[in-house]
Image: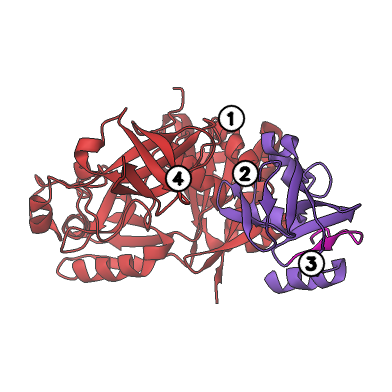
Chain colours: A red, B purple
Amino acid sequence: MTTQSPLHEVHTELGASFTDFAGWSMPVRYSSELAEHRAVRETAGQFDLSHMAEIEVTGPEAGHALNYAMVGNLAGIKVGRARYTMLCHETGGVLDDLVVYRPGEERFMVVANAGNAAVAVTELTERASGFDAVVTDRSAETALIAVQGPRAAGILRGLLESVELDGGLDALKYYAATPAVLGGHELLLARTGYTGEDGFELFCPAAEAPAVWRRVAEAGEPQGLLPAGLACRDTLRLEAGMPLYGNELTVWLTPFEANLGRLVKFDKSGDFVGRTALEKHSEPEQVLAGLRGTGRRAPRHGYRVLDGEREVGEVTSGALSPTLGYPIAMAYLPPRLSEPGTSLSVDIRGRPEQVEVAALPFYKRAK
Amino acid sequence: MSNIPENLSYTKEHEWLSAADGVATVGITSFAAESLGDIVFVQLPAVGDTITAGEPCGEIESTKSVSELYAPVTGEVVEINEAAADAPELINSDPYEQGWLFRVRTESMPELLDAQEYSKVVEEGE
């Protein structure tokens, strides 16, 4: 039994192909994932991310509870801003990577991956139990729509009736969020995303999501906005060098191995789950690196990375990059082999293909 | 709804064949192309290769997945579609005409599915 998004009917009307993703039936593509990918890079794309979990943490000690529960300094987030962080196991392994928003002094919203929603809710509830804070799972009643791409701001600017932030949408910084009204619908407008482009994420009540989606689609269409599915979301985030839980991040890996050690704030006051283990883990034996191939055969998840005949690592994600035109991948490698320019190969279904270690991200938008 | 032309023969591996004068033209069906998504790379057998029915003879890769191309018949490859190799999007846009893959000279045609039988395979797969 799969869960349907509050936008399911809209997707069906648009002729989407669906895929099962973490127990949700979500659009994998509407027509062509390459066209959708290109739209996000050149104009704009609209994604349904309602499968993601929204967990509200409120109360006078909400910030302290989050500081104990996760590796970042979440109590230090300014009201109206957001931060990328990790929920770790006692062993230091990553249970989920999340974005924490602070819409109010005593109100935080934690956005977790669909596949880790249950773990995130359980762990946050348990870890917050010693604090004056309440954890509430708002996932079922909340829809999430992302509008990403160079024209996203232009499309939304014309649609928003009001933005609480002084200066409006244009004053909204990357990793910031503000209440706003679009088509009469109150929503939380965040300048965040997972595509490597400028873009926004709109949190709104599930029942109002179809109306919000249609307003954006109507206004965006003349601008080249396309509905975009999970297939292009994956190639977009890969080009942008962003990790995907289950591929680059697992409970068997620490944030240090994923090159995200900077997220672990040892200098924050108080203990946090995983601190002791992470303090010992700061010299990883394997690190996440980028690979760039030649030809057109792409390394894929699970393929072996070879140094000569010897297996030295494993590919976590890979694809023929739609923007760059050559194969790109991420892989775990020993630090001594992770320098950009290092020549290695990947066993692609029995045939070794030459690759070179490349700096991440593969793609960076022009400012 | 997938397009399944009446005049072609099919395999359970979602390939189509059109045979004339001992030469079979082979491609993948629109159902296969749609399931794969945008095809970005195709590795075809070489002209002169002998391929064996039921054995892999190439690869077809989309951004999301890769699948093997199975030889639907035994015989010698006499021609490959260079246009489709250069522009694999032809396989998505026109799988039964411009997106054909290769031609095989064969002495015996195996038992294949007709359009109706193949549409049942597709329905079960959906």
Q: Do the residues labelled 2 and 1 touch (CB within 8 Å)?
A: no
Q: How far apart are marks 4 and 1 (CA)?
A: 26 Å
Front of the two marks 2 and 3? 3
Is residue B6 found inside the magenta-colored segment of the image?
Answer: yes
Among the two numbered marks 4 and 1 on one chain, the one whose residue lies closer to the N terminus: 1
Q: Is mark 2 on a helix, strand or loop?
A: strand
Residue picked out by circle 3: B110
Residue picked out by circle 1: A42
Question: What amino acid type is highlighted by mark number 1?
Answer: Glu
Residue picked out by circle 2: B43
Question: What amino acid type is highlighted by mark number 2?
Answer: Gln
Label the magenta part by its dominant secondary structure: loop
Q: Distance between the residues labelled 2 and 3?
A: 24 Å
Locate residue A144, reporting x and y percent. 50, 54
Marks 2 and 1 share the same chain:
no
Specify the quadrant that holds the N terminus of chain A.
bottom right
Locate residue A263, reporting x and y percent. 22, 44
Q: Is mark 1 on a helix, strand or loop?
A: helix
Question: Residue at position x 74%, y 47% from top?
Answer: B77
Q: Which chain carries label 4?
A: A
Front of the two marks 4 and 2? 2
- Part of the protein shown in magenta: B2-11
Question: What amino acid type is highlighted by mark number 3?
Answer: Pro
Among the two numbered marks 2 and 3 on one chain, the one whose residue lies closer to the N terminus: 2
Residue picked out by circle 4: A299
